[in-house]
Amino acid sequence: MSTTDYPVDMSVQPEVTAFFDAATNTISYVVKDPASSACAVVDSVMDIDYAAGRITYDHADQIIRFIQNNGLTLEWLIETHVHADHLSAAPYIQSKLGGKLGIGDKITVVQDTFGKIFNEGTEFQRDGSQFDCLFADGDTYTIGSMTAFAMYTPGHTPACMVHVIGNAAFVGDTLFMPDGGSARADFPGGDAGVLYDSIQKVLALPDDMRLFMCHDYGPDGRDIRWETTVGEEKAHNIHVGGGKTKEEFVKFRTERDAQLDMPKLIIPSLQVNMRAGQLPPADESGKRFLKVPLNGL
């Protein structure tokens, strides 16, 4: 779809509350309909002590308390993509508060790719059925009186989507803050040229569209930030702003990605997140295990 085909409505101004997870530099959001108690949660985080193999839910519990204390009704849990740097807490939050869990329909591509990498058996379904809703490009859904839509933005992963809710867009890893640039494109199924095209779709939204990041790392020691605008990104993004060409971006992104280490939590994150935040199934003794594919990533 072209950007003009999406149902943009800048008159709707959702109330956005951010929750920063310092361990993974992830920002999760509660997005509230200003006309009702309805809300959505975008990109939640489940805590893991990887060295100890211990799962906890402190970050998710903060979000749950916020929703409960403010008398909100959770209607959606949105994943912008299959994250490689943190584990989703969506099923845990859903078990406490309800709501539907949604992700882009190209999750099936990710499940097929990483199902092979992690040598998952036939019991691992690769049809996205772990989620309640699979969004195609341009699909709409409602949060109270607000109409949201999903914009397909592959390149970082094959299943990335930007979710636009009124005058607020949740960009996942498609963009970082202007001084942070863009996300890597060298994971299986990633593509720097495709990412550039996806970023251009986002930058074709209205200049005053609010953009909310999934990650921020405080470049050069600045305070953590997570909100900017399309206009700011177009003018100042260090990777794509100021009219940088696709060729310039692909050259830079490819060279840069070749120097990056893998995310610390990529192995547990992918195994959990491709299952919609569920842990791998227990063995006959009731224990659960994560796999480490040697020379597989």
Image (cartoon, rainbow, N blue to C red):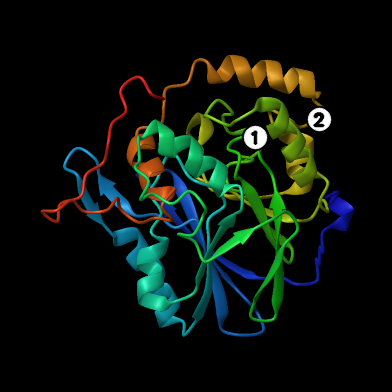
Residue 259, compared with residue 288, is above or below; it is above
Neighbor class of circle 1 (other Cα within 10 Å; few <14, some 14-19, many 20+) is: many
Task: Find disc 1 in the rendering and name its residue.
Answer: 155
Residue 215: image x %, image y %? 51, 44
**Quarter of the figure with the C terminus:** top left
> Is any atom of residue 195 visible in this view?
yes
Residue at the image position 73 percent from the left and 54 percent from the top: 137
Q: For this rendering, which residue is in front, 113 or 193?
A: 113
Residue at the image position 38 percent from the left and 59 percent from the top: 89
Judged left or right of residue 44, residue 79 is right
Residue 169, compared with residue 9, is above or below; it is above
> Is any atom of residue 217 visible in this view?
no
Q: For this rendering, which residue is in front, 65 or 273?
A: 273
Q: For this rendering, which residue is in front, 242 or 61?
A: 61
Contact, mark 2 vs mark 1 (Cβ under 8 Å) = no
Occupied quadrant, residue 268: top left
In the picture as drawn, the residue positioned furthest to the right comes out as: 4
Residue at the image position 55 percent from the left and 48 percent from the top: 107
Residue 58, compared with residue 117, is above or below; it is below
Task: Find disc 2 in the rendering and name its residue.
Answer: 242
Occupied quadrant, residue 177: top right
Residue 154, compared with residue 93, is above or below; it is above
Judged left or right of residue 100, residue 291 is left
Does dot 2 land on a helix, a strand or a loop? loop
Q: Amino acid at mark 2?
A: Gly
Q: CA distance from mark 2 to mark 1?
A: 21 Å
